[in-house]
Amino acid sequence: MSSPAARSHPHPALTDTEVQALVKEHLFEQAPIMIALLDSECHVVAGNASFRRTFPEWAHQRCYQLFKNSMRRCPSCVALKTLQDAKVRVHEEIIAKDGVEPTQYVVRVARLGPSDTSPPALIMWMASEVTEAVSLLKENELLFERVPCYVTVLDRNLRIVRSNRKMKETFGGRKGEHCYRVYKRRDSPCPGCATLMVFRDGADHTASQVGVSATGEEVHYIESSSALVREGGGRVNRVIQMSTDVTNLHLLEKEKIEAERMAAVGQTVAGLAHGIKNILMGVEGGVYVLQSGLRQNNPARLDTGVEMLSRNVEKISALVKNLLSFSKGTVPHVTLTDPNKVAREILELYGQTARKAGIELRAEQQEGVEPAALDAEGIHTCLANLVSNAIDACQWSEKKGCRVTLKTSEENGVLCFEVADDGCGMDYDVKKKIFTTFFTTKGSGGTGLGLLLTRKIVQEHGGKILVDSEPERGTTFRILLPRNRLPRPTGDSGIGGEGGSAGAGA
C-alpha cells in the first residue's frame, strides 16, 4: 500500500537524472541569455538555444574564433584565468560576428568541476547583450553633462544629489550641499521654491529666479522642476531641476527700459518749457501783487501775494524733484522693508487732506506679510503718487462720499500694493496716455511725471503696474512685485520702511 504522501501526488517522484535533465532543458536550454561550455583549450563543447541561434557555426571552434574572428588567443584570456584560480569573473566584451556590427556584452565566466578532474574542468560562459543599454546610458550621460542649462538632482532635504558641468562651473555646487546655499548664498529655502512645490504635489513647477554665481555675479534664470524618482504610493523622492540662464535677456530688458527712460527725459525737458513759462508767469504775478501791497500798505494784498508765491514755489519744487528722480539712473537703496509699514505712513501723510475733502481714506492690510527687499523711499513715492491722484479723482467726481482704499497683500510669492478709488475714472484714450511723457489730467496743477516716475521705480524692483478704470466708476492701480525678482539689499539688512517725501501726482 502506498503512503499518504505518495497518494497525495498524482505522479511518482522524479529521479535525480530526470531532475537534471529538466534543469538542463529549462534553465540551460531556455535561458534568454547566451550560455556556452568551454574546455581547457577554449573549444566550445556545448551551447544553449540562444547561443546556437547567435552562433550557428559554433561546433569545433574556439571562443576567440567565434567571438573575435581571430586565429590567436586573446592576450589576457579571462577563461583561462578562471580555469586556473576558480574565481568567477564578470567583464564587458565586444563580440564581432561576420557581417554584423560589433556588439557589446556583459560576460560572466565560472569554472565547472574541480581543477584536478579528468578530463579537465569546463568553463561556463554566459553573455548578455548590453549595446543598446550602454549606448543609451552614454547618450543620457552626455546630454546631462553637455546640455546648455543648469541641471541639478535634489533630495527631499533640498540637498544636491547630482549636478551637471555647467552648474558646477557657474555656481560651484558640490554633492550634499543645499541648493539654496549654492544658487543664492542663502541660509534657508527660497520663497516660492518650485522644487518644494514638486515635492508637495508631484506636479511640474516653473519660477523666475535670481542667483549669485561663484564669482559673485548676479545670474537670472528660469527654473523648471519635475519629479524624477517616486516611491511607492507616488511620493516624490527626487526632483530634477533644470534652469535656463536669461541674464543676457534681463540685461537687454534693462537697457531697453533705460533707453526709453532717457528718450522720455529728453521729450519731457523739451515739453517742460510750457509748464515752466506758466509757473514763472504765476511767480511774476505774485511778485507784482506783493509789491503793490507793500506800496499801498495793504495787508490783505500782501497775504495774497505771499500765497501766490508760495503756491508757485511748491509747483517748481515738485517739478524739479520729479524730474531729477525720473532722470537719475542710480541704483535703489534696498533694505528689508515692512510693506504694511510703508502703507501706514501713506495713510498718515494723506489722512488730513482726505478728511478735509470729505473723502474716506482707509487701509486693508493682509496679516503676516513678511518684510521684503524694497527701496522704502521709492515705494513710498509710488504710493504717495497713486493716493494723491486717487484723492484728486474723487474731488473731480460729482459723487459725494467717495472712498480711497490702500491695500497690501501677498499671494504665491507676489507682493501687491493696490490703490482703488470710486472717483471720476478714466476713459480709454486717457488710460492709453497716463504713462506717456508729460501727460497730465491736472492742467497747470500737474507735471506729467508722477506716473512715469512710479512706473520707473516699479520696474527697478522687477515688477509691473496695472491699471483698471471706467468713467464715473473709479480707478484701481496695482503694483505687483514678485519676491524672486526683487533687487538684492544694498545696505543694512535691518527692517526698514521709512518712506521719503511724496512726489507730485500725475
Image (cartoon, rainbow, N blue to C red):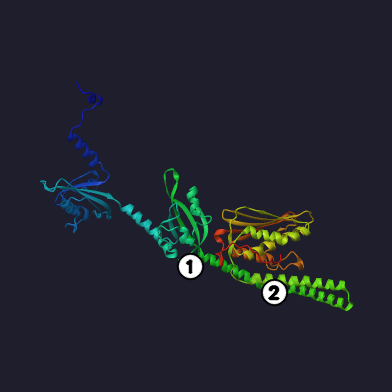
Q: Residue 216 bears which disc, if any? A: 1
What is the CA distance from the residue labelled 1 to the residue labelled 2?
41 Å
Q: Is residue 1 above or below residue 453?
A: above
Q: Is residue 129 above or below residue 491?
A: above
Q: Which quadrant of the figure has residue 407?
A: bottom right
For badge 2, the amino acid type reads: Ala
Percent coordinates x, y for residue 332 in the rendering: 60, 67
- Which comes sooner in the sequence, label 1 or label 2? 1
For badge 1, the amino acid type reads: Gly
Q: Is residue 479 visible?
A: no
Report the residue marked by disc 2. Answer: 270
Percent coordinates x, y for residue 1 in the rendering: 19, 20
Element type at marker 1? loop
Q: Which quadrant of the figure has residue 272?
A: bottom right
Residue at the extreme bottom of the image, as rendered: 295
Percent coordinates x, y for residue 199 in the rendering: 47, 50
Q: Is residue 199 visible?
A: yes
- Quarter in which the C terminus is drawn: bottom right
Horizontally, is 264 left or right of 201 in the view? right
Q: Is residue 16 above or below residue 485?
A: above
Q: Residues within 10 Å of mark 1 (few under 14, many from 20)?
A: few
